[in-house]
Image (tube, rainbow, N blue to C red):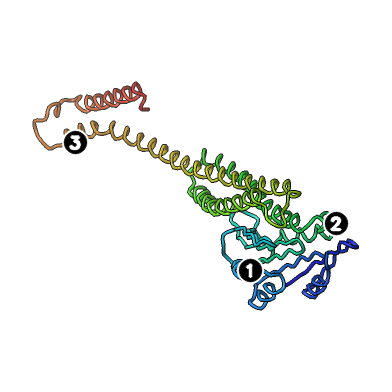
């Protein structure tokens, strides 16, 4: 689906429509066009964009893919930015990504996303509500979209922080393999997110250090703000990745400690019963001349010896602080 927003500085009007606004934009000297493409970037559409907006074919190919690392590229008269955002139904760390491509020039901004994008929808809603305006330029609009993209990640990360704290409390009291499996899945998801965030950090650092058209010095503060948001998301993902790793190591250590305690108890029981079994084995042999065999108090003597051995062993284990 193709949607256009045509902004006219002369009367400060904003008109939403279809590709028919492209001709009207071409006939104007100062109008600003936002062309949003929701879905597949077909070859005829690529050809139209290349001819009308002078977009590079390789950049269009990158924008048409469903999987590609985030990047930024300067083409002189416009800048190409490729971000990895969240799908519309992603509300947890186990999320799906969509590619969000932006071609930004002084007089146009072209966005393409492979599936529904809440960041695009929120930006359009803010434009219609008058909270932001295309009068500030296409660069400011693209930074606004980028800020919406990273803020969705922030919400997921903050929710994960609460869940990790809950799992930490559970792990200290309960050895549950389901808890371990959940933490391992979080660590896997965080690995993927960290990769995205570090791409985004590098992307906006490059934009801040070497701004391209239409990102001029007037947008320095907005660029810094987006950089800070990206750095914060990356640092949170790194932190929670380390927390998940520590929880896994802690769970394994606690499980090993509990197993050691169980083995210690079993070893102590075995150590107590070995001499008792030895004595019982001796007096269970069928020999006529075993000492004390015919003693009327032999049974009680053997029991007394066995109880004394048990008491001495327990006393010895306690003295050595084994129990």
Which of the 4 image quadrants contains residue 86?
bottom right
At horizontal 88% and vertical 63% (from top left) the residue drawn is: 13
Whichever of labels 3 and 1 marks the residue nearer the N terminus, that label is 1
Q: Residue furthest right?
A: 11
In terms of secondary structure, where does tag 1 sit?
A: loop
- Residue 31: which disc? none
Asked whether disc 2 touches disc 3, contact meaning CB atoms under 8 Å apart, the reply is no
Give the foreground label among 2 and 3.
Answer: 2
Q: For mark 3, what is the residue?
A: 281
Determine if residue 88 is in view. no
At horizontal 20% and vertical 24% (from top left) the residue drawn is: 297
Q: Residues within 10 Å of mark 3 (few under 14, many from 20)?
A: few
Q: For mark 1, what is the residue?
A: 56
Whichever of labels 2 and 1 marks the residue nearer the N terminus, that label is 1
Q: Residues within 10 Å of mark 2 (few under 14, many from 20)?
A: few
Give the foreground label among 2 and 1.
Answer: 1
Tell whether 187 sits left or right of 97. left
Q: Residue furthest bottom?
A: 44
Q: CA distance from mark 3 to mark 1?
A: 91 Å
At horizontal 35% and vertical 34% (from top left) the residue drawn is: 264
Q: CA distance from mark 2 to mark 3?
A: 94 Å
Q: For mark 2, what is the residue?
A: 130
From this view, report whether residue 187 is shown above or below residue 89: above
Residue 294: x percent and y percent?
Answer: 14, 28
Q: CA distance from mark 2 to mark 1?
A: 33 Å
Tell whether 318 sits left or right of 193. left
Q: Residues within 10 Å of mark 1 (few under 14, many from 20)?
A: some
- Image quadrant for the N terminus? bottom right
Which of the 4 image quadrants contains residue 5?
bottom right
From this view, report whether residue 273 is shown above or below residue 36: above
In terms of secondary structure, where does tag 2 sit?
A: loop
Depth check, front residue: 121 or 49: 49
């Amino acid at each position: 689906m193709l949607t256009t927003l045509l902004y006219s500085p002369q009367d400060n009007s904003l008109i939403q429509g279809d590709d028919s606004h492209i001709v009207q934009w071409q006939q104007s000297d100062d109008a600003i066009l936002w062309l949003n493409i929701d879905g597949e970037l077909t070859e005829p559409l690529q050809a139209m964009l290349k001819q009308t907006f002078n977009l590079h074919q390789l950049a269009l190919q990158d924008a048409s893919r469903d999987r590609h690392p985030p990047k930024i590229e300067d083409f002189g008269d416009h800048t190409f930015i490729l971000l990895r955002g969240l799908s519309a139904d992603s509300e947890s760390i186990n999320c799906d990504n969509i590619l969000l491509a932006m071609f930004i020039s002084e007089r146009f901004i072209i966005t393409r996303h492979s599936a529904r994008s809440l960041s695009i929808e929120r930006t359009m809603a803010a434009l219609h509500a008058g909270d932001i305006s295309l009068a500030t330029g296409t660069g400011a609009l693209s930074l606004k979209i980028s800020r919406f993209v990273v803020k969705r990640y922030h919400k997921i990360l903050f929710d994960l922080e609460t869940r990790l704290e809950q799992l930490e409390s559970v792990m200290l009291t309960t050895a549950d393999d389901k808890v371990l499996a959940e933490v391992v899945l979080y660590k896997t998801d965080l690995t993927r997110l960290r990769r995205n965030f570090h791409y985004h950090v590098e992307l906006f650092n490059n934009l801040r250090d070497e701004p391209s058209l239409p990102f001029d010095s007037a947008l320095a503060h907005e660029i810094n703000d987006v950089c800070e948001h990206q750095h914060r998301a990356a640092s949170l993902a790194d932190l929670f990745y380390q927390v998940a790793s520590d929880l896994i190591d802690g769970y394994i250590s606690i499980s090993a400690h509990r197993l050691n305690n169980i083995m210690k108890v079993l070893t102590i029981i075995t150590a107590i019963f070995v001499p008792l079994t030895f004595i019982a084995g001796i007096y269970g042999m069928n020999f006529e001349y075993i000492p004390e065999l015919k003693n009327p108090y032999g049974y009680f003597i053997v029991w007394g010896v066995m109880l004394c051995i048990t008491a001495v062993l327990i006393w010895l284990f306690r003295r050595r602080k084994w129990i």
